[in-house]
Amino acid sequence: MMARTAPFIVFRMAVYFGVAIAYMLMTGVGAGVGWGIGGFGDEGFRAGATLWGGFAGFGITAAVMYFLREYLLYVVKAGHIAVLVDLMDGKTLSQGRSQIAHARAEVTARFGQTSTLFAVDQLIKGVLKAITGLLRGMMSIIPVPGARQIVSVVQAFLRIAVGFIDEVILAYAIRTGSTNAWHSAREGLVLYGQNYKVMLKNAAWLALFVYGLSFLVFLIMLAPAGLAVYLIPGAWSAGGMVFALLFAWSVKVALLEPFAIACMMQVYFRTIEGQTPDPAWEQRLDSLSAKFRKLKEKAVSAGAPESAATPNPAATPAS
């Protein structure tokens, strides 16, 4: 699946490695400007000006990326999910730039504007946090010595593990072919909830795989990142670690995350095949999460039935 969506993999690499390089360049430019300004003072002033200039360059890039987060979700992440869904359904994929154009058209048909997709994604993440909170609560009452420490570790790990699942729910919304993204997301969450054991088990293994490899990339990138810092005026000592983290992040989101999401999609669609949303789980999520209730309000206002468990021909994905 990764090989057959190679145009999107290359696209992701260009985008996210470009982001990492932008951070490095802007940090270097900021440090250079600070170093130049520092020439008006003594060595201590120059060192401080260089440091603050580097921070300023890094911060400006971070601010720009914050405003671009909706666009990246819409074009890069959701687009790749759309072509992965087509591939799983046995459809013939376009190649080259036409694959990316097709994916964008598919995402637009399901979600419309970037703001809608971003809002749906944020609500999905909120509901997933509520589900993991329920699981943590259940574990905390188990009478096991050292249970509090165990729960703290599990809590941190669950936050990492569910990081891939929101995009799987988006995949469900795309695969059902529904034009009411709010309702599809609500259905997908109910189906996830009633199969949470299988999904979390697989998410846990994938999280170990992805973050383990990301750590190896971080170690490998320490040397070239250190060289980049050496070239910055004033040699920012902490920069090597920061830049190595940036490149490890780039590899994670460009290569490792789509692999994990493809695996999770296969598990999810195979697990829910033939199932319909369970009204009991829908009621549980209604009582548990205000964001789930918000999804219901949005879905109903867009013309969906009030219950996600209402029979829907699109609710059962094709095998």
Image (cartoon, grey):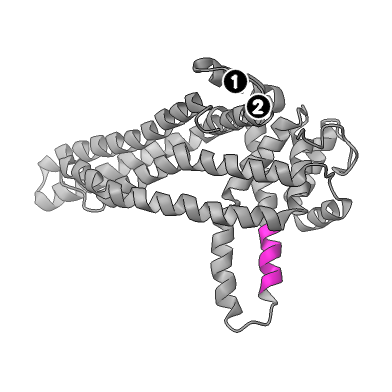
Which residue: 42% across, 32% down? 13
* Secondary structure beneath label 1: loop
Identify the residue position indicated by label 2 in the image. Answer: 86
Q: Earlier in the sequence, mark 2 or mark 1?
A: 2
Which residue: 57% across, 66% down? 154
Residue farthest to the top, as pictured: 98
Q: Per the image, is 132 magenta?
A: yes
Disc 2 and disc 1 in contact, CB within 8 angstroms:
yes
- Residue 101: where, in percent of width, then height? 57, 17
Residue farthest to the left, as pictured: 42
Identify the residue position indicated by label 1 in the image. Answer: 93
Give the answer, above or below, for where 267 lies relative to 170. Answer: below
Give the answer, above or below, for where 227 lies relative to 176. Answer: below
Q: Per the image, is 70 magenta?
A: no
Q: Amino acid at mark 2?
A: Asp
Q: Which image quarter holds the N terminus?
A: top right
